[in-house]
Image (cartoon, rainbow, N blue to C red):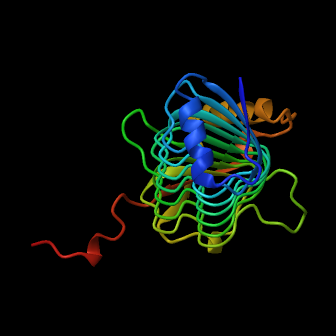
């Protein structure tokens, strides 16, 4: 295993070093990260990177199968346009996590910011998944076109909401699962609540279990039937805004 000390290292130099090391070494630990951007961008299957510190913007952008584990918080746009792979965050993550995400999985132990899952999409077997342990900010799943978002709402105060406002605004695909009942005023008009099916409970059990094992938590108290499920009302909500010639 290769260990890289990122202390006071310019982000381009750090990423160049990681690129060179991954040609021969597939297990890399990067210590003392402090906001360096683009770590793990475009990395392919077989590479595993552990990051200690605060991951900078656009970490794992366009990632193509690698595995990243962050021991600390992550800044904005984590997993931007990610194709495949897995990201685990032992902390919180910022805004626009999973922007235009095409595949792979992101697990965040704590909370996430605004516009998480914006423009998520799927194609055939490529179905991106975001699992959030705490709460999410405004515009969760905005313009979502595919994949799945699961918010567990763990460790929140009694007066804290699991989501902000404008959830699923512009949603035209995919699915959002939220633990507990939610106020309708928090959602965009493009989303509708539907009943859970057997396939939903299987999905929830699977990914709650992955989350619990990944963060060493006992979540046996969570009842999968306590989740609310939200889908898009239709697949082309803005068709009346465009002219056909």
Question: In the rendering, at what x and y percent does residue 77 appear?
Answer: 58, 58
Nearer-the-camera pick, 165 or 22: 22
Taking the image as shown, residue 79 lies to the left or right of residue 242, namely right
Reply above or below: 68 against 156: above
Taking the image as shown, residue 224 lies to the left or right of residue 196, namely right
Give me the residue at 53% from left, 38% from top. 104
Give me the residue at 51% from left, 36% from top. 43
Taking the image as shown, residue 204 lies to the left or right of residue 20, namely right
Nearer-the-camera pick, 6 or 194: 6
The quarter of the image holding the C terminus is bottom left
Reply above or below: 186 against 51: below
Give me the residue at 90% from left, 64% from top. 158
Nearer-the-camera pick, 122 or 14: 14
| Residue 78 can be seen in this image | no
Reply above or below: 130 against 117: above
Question: In the rendering, at what x and y percent does residue 1 appear?
Answer: 71, 23
Question: In the rendering, at what x and y percent does residue 116 appear?
Answer: 60, 59
| Residue 208 can be seen in this image | yes
- Label count reads 0
Specify the quadrant of the image occupied by residue 106: top right
Furthest-right residue in this view:
158
Nearer-the-camera pick, 205 or 73: 73
Specify the quadrant of the image occupied by residue 230: bottom right
Give me the residue at 61% from left, 23% from top. 25
């Amino acid at each position: 295993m290769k260990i890289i000390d990122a202390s006071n290292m310019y982000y381009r130099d750090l990423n160049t070093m990681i690129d060179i090391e991954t040609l021969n070494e597939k297990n890399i630990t990067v210590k003392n990260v402090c906001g360096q951007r683009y770590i793990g961008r475009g990395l392919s299957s077989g590479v595993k990177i552990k990051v200690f510190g605060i991951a900078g913007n656009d970490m794992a952008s366009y990632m193509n199968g690698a595995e990243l584990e962050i021991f600390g918080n992550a800044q904005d746009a984590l997993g931007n346009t990610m194709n495949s792979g897995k990201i685990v965050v032992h902390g919180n993550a910022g805004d626009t996590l999973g922007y235009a995400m095409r595949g792979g999985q992101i697990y965040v132990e704590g909370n996430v910011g605004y516009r998480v899952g914006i423009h998520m999409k799927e194609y055939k077997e490529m179905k991106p998944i975001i699992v959030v342990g705490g709460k999410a900010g405004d515009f969760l799943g905005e313009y979502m076109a595919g994949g799945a978002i699961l918010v567990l709402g763990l460790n929140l105060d009694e007066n804290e909401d699991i989501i902000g406002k404008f959830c699923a605004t512009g949603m035209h695909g995919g699915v959002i699962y939220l633990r507990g009942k939610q106020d309708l005023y928090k959602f965009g008009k493009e989303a509708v609540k539907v009943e859970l099916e057997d396939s939903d409970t299987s999905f929830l059990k699977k990914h709650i279990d992955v989350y619990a094992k990944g963060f060493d938590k006992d979540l046996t108290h969570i009842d999968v039937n306590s989740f609310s499920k939200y889908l898009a009302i239709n697949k082309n909500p803005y068709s009346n805004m465009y002219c056909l010639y």
